[in-house]
Every structure is written in structure tokens, then in C-alpha cells.
Image: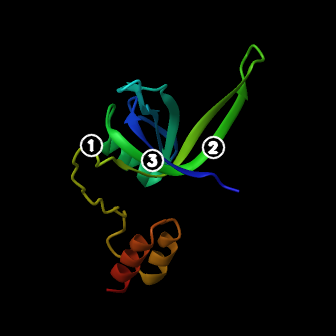
């Protein structure tokens, strides 16, 4: 069973980029969630929950270009636990979110959306058989349709 969640908070760290292998971009950041509570007639901050958000492929590229430390965001994804044992033998666990979607929280501000169209590097002359072969590595349906229509034209 998958644990799908959504969280709101502020980006608590710079977005870090790593190229895991050729063609696979990875980005991560820390998300800070601090609830406000009404106690004794006034608003106070409760304890902050920190969680790491991991993004891959196009989402990673767009997150790198769009968000920065302090931005209010909404994150949707799968909750994961990463466990390890350090050099002294002490076990550790960390919760992360494998993000499916990340966006600015518009309840506290405004943003402008800019659609990014992925570019395919294609040879100058493409035969239909060649385009089908090159399409096998493309992940977006929109990119596949564009590649096939261009090859047929």
C-alpha cells in the first residue's frame, strides 16, 4: 500500500541539484511545516516538522528554476522512509516525500506560470522508421506525437 500525502510549508533550504546519471536529473530540498496554534488567547508557533522532498526528471528541472528558500509551497507525493546505520552502529531513519507535484502556495502570494515545452534533439532528415526508434527513449506522450507528426510531414 502506498502512502500518498500532500503538505504545505516553506522551502527551508536551497534546492540541491544532482545528475544521478546521464539524462537523469535529481533535485531535493527541505520543507519546513510550522503550524500556528491559538493558545491562551494568542497565536503561537508549534514545533516545526522538517521533511526532505526529492524530485526527478522534468519536475526536478522545473523546481530548480522555480522555487527558492523561503517560498511557500504545496508538495504532493509518496511518503518514504530511508533507514541506515551510521559508522558507530547507530540506526537512523528519515522521512522523505518522493514528489509527484510541487507548486507555490497561492493562499499567501501570486506567481506566474510559464509552460516549458521539452525539446527533442532530432537529425535534420528523419525517416519514419528512424523516428519510431528514437521515440522509444522519449517519456512524454506529447513528445511522441510531435516526433511522429514531424517524421510523417
Quadrant where the image shows the C terminus: bottom left
Q: CA distance from mark 1 to mark 2?
A: 28 Å
| Real-space Cα separation, disc 1 to disc 3, in angstroms | 15 Å
**Residue at the (21%, 53%) spot, across then down:** 112
Tag nearer the camera, 1 or 3? 1
**Does any portion of residue 23 appear in the rendered image?**
no
Which residue is identified by label 1?
108
Q: Is residue 5 visible?
A: yes
Task: Give the CA distance from mark 3 to mark 2.
Answer: 14 Å
Q: How many neighbours does mark 1 have within 10 angstroms: few (below 14), some (14-19), or many (20 or more)?
A: few
Residue 80: x and y, percent?
63, 43
Q: Nearer the viewer, residue 29 or 145?
A: 29
Residue 52, image x and y in percent?
52, 35
SS type, badge 1: loop
- Which residue is label 2 attached to? 80
Mark carried by residue 75: 3
Q: Nearer the viewer, residue 92 or 20?
A: 92
Residue drawn at point x = 51 percent, y = 65 percent = 137
Could you say where residue 46 lies in the image, as x and y percent from the top left?
Answer: 46, 26
Earlier residue among tags 3 and 2: 3
Amino acid at each position: 500500500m502506498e502512502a500518498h500525502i500532500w503538505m504545505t510549508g516553506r522551502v527551508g533550504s536551497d534546492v540541491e541539484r544532482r545528475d544521478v546519471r546521464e539524462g537523469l536529473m535529481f533535485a531535493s530540498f527541505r520543507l519546513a511545516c510550522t503550524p500556528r496554534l491559538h493558545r491562551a488567547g494568542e497565536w503561537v508557533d508549534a514545533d516545526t516538522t522538517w521533511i526532505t522532498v526529492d524530485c526527478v526528471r522534468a519536475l526536478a528541472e522545473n523546481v530548480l528554476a522555480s522555487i527558492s528558500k523561503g517560498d511557500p509551497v504545496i508538495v504532493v507525493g509518496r511518503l518514504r522512509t530511508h533507514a541506515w546505520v551510521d559508522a558507530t552502529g547507530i540506526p537512523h531513519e528519515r522521512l522523505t516525500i518522493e514528489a509527484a507535484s510541487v507548486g507555490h502556495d497561492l493562499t499567501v502570494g501570486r506567481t506566474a506560470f510559464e509552460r516549458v515545452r521539452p525539446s527533442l534533439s532530432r537529425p535534420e532528415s528523419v525517416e519514419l522508421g528512424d523516428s519510431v526508434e528514437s521515440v522509444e527513449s522519449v517519456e512524454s506522450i506529447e513528445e511522441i506525437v510531435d516526433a511522429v507528426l514531424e517524421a510523417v510531414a
